[in-house]
Amino acid sequence: MLFVGDDWAEDHHDVEILDSDGKRLGRARLPEGMAGMTRLHEMLAEHLDDADLDSDTGMLAVGRVVVGIESDRGPWVGALIAAGYQVFAINPMSVARYRERHSTSGAKSDAGDAHVLAEIVRLDRSHHRPVAGDSELSEAIKLMARSHQSLVWDRTRHLQRLREVLREYYPGLLDALAAGKLQLADPDAWELIQSAPDPDRAARLSRSKITAILRRNRRRNAEARAEQIQAVLRAPALRQPPAVQAAYTTIAVTQVHLLNALASQIPTLEEVLGQGFGQHPDAEIYTSQPGLGVVLAARVLGEFGDDPHRYTDAKARKNYAGTSPITRASGKKKIVLARYARNRRLGDALQQWAFCSLRGSPGARAYYKQLRDRNIGHQAALRQHANRLVGILHGCLKTGTLYDETTAWSHHTIQAAA
């Protein structure tokens, strides 16, 4: 067997090849792209022979070349997998700890990290997870779901920035929106800001124009709301100096333009995401779970992947999800803590799933109530509830069956009755 450590950068890869005894067989800095990959194949071929090829397919026998790299995506990783190499994506935090075993001086180099990665997959690969063999459709769903989630997070950030800017120079507009029962995230609120981006223009804004804005967005009692908004906008208020106010006005309008662009692109991305998710063979199982709509289900599927051999049991899936707790025990002291080192995108999706399931599942509501009755906080209860939902999902995927309310919560119902 050959063990390869690959310390990657944007334009090059430092690689080192070891044999089963830890003897260095080769070391090089390879360029990114086809030329570098070809050179890596040539370096490995120097130490392989016909006995390393599968007699039926002519391809490299699985497991003869093991690669450790700090990434699980990209054309380079895809080419390594396509070549028949077994690839392990090593967490950079783990690499940092292993580096301390080889050097206590704090020295670091790309070539040194390549050696550490090679040693990790040579000695401790059983403690790490190989890159999953997810389908192309699953990878595409993950990319689309992550892009959609990023746009939603960007929208929230821009809304917070807009609110902060308005508080600095135009708090009367926030009061006017509250008087008209509008939220800053509403499109008519953005249109109102564009029509009156500063207190001077707001004071001159006519009631008919405010009414027209509300009617375009199908607001009830538009006339009464417009009267309330106009009254607040014309009320005396503290002002910033003219030059400062002009700068804030430009910033606020820019934020509104960005929010409008995001608002137009997010639904488009949702539609494409839904089409791709609907083609996946496990889509029906995911959407049968309480609280999982198409978008949220696509996020969960994309982050879990669809490799049937990736999770040996429900516990392994829960550990990857980050919903299962960790235990720290030393002597007589033992504490149970939440697992904060996890996939942040998956964790966010699971928290939303746990919250949404409370509305559509009596079993989920009863389980959540049991947790709260034990004086467990809301977030901790949602995390434990999500842990249970992940186990239910794993069982459904393993057996190829849809969610069943009675089966899913029968164990906890029996325990509660006892």
Image (spheres, helix red, strand yellow):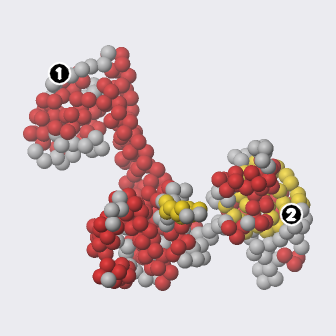
Q: Earlier in the sequence, mark 2 or mark 1?
A: 2
Split into 4 quadrants, where in the image is the N terminus? bottom right
Q: Nearer the viewer, residue 301 or 338?
A: 338
The quadrant where residue 307 appears: bottom right
Q: Residues within 10 Å of mark 2 (few under 14, many from 20)?
A: some
Secondary structure of the residue carrying tag 2 is: loop
The quadrant where residue 2 appears: bottom right
Residue 393: x and y in percent read 44, 74
The quadrant where residue 154 appears: top left
Seen at 33% across and 27% down, the residue is 168
Q: Is residue 109 above or below residue 334?
A: above
Residue 230: x and y in percent read 15, 31
Given the image, on which type of amino acid does mark 1 rest? Pro
Does the image show residue 248?
yes
Q: How many marks?
A: 2
Residue 145: x and y in percent read 47, 59
Split into 4 quadrants, where in the image is the C terminus? bottom left
Tell whether 118 sits left or right of 314. Answer: right
Direction front: furthest residue: 332
Does the image show residue 409?
no
Q: Is residue 337 above or below residue 50?
A: above
The numbered mark at residue 236 is 1
Residue 26: x and y in percent read 88, 57
Given the image, on which type of amino acid does mark 2 rest? Gly
| Residue receiving disc 2 | 22
Seen at 38% across and 58% down, the residue is 379
Secondary structure of the residue carrying tag 1 is: loop
Q: Is residue 250 above or below residue 255?
A: above
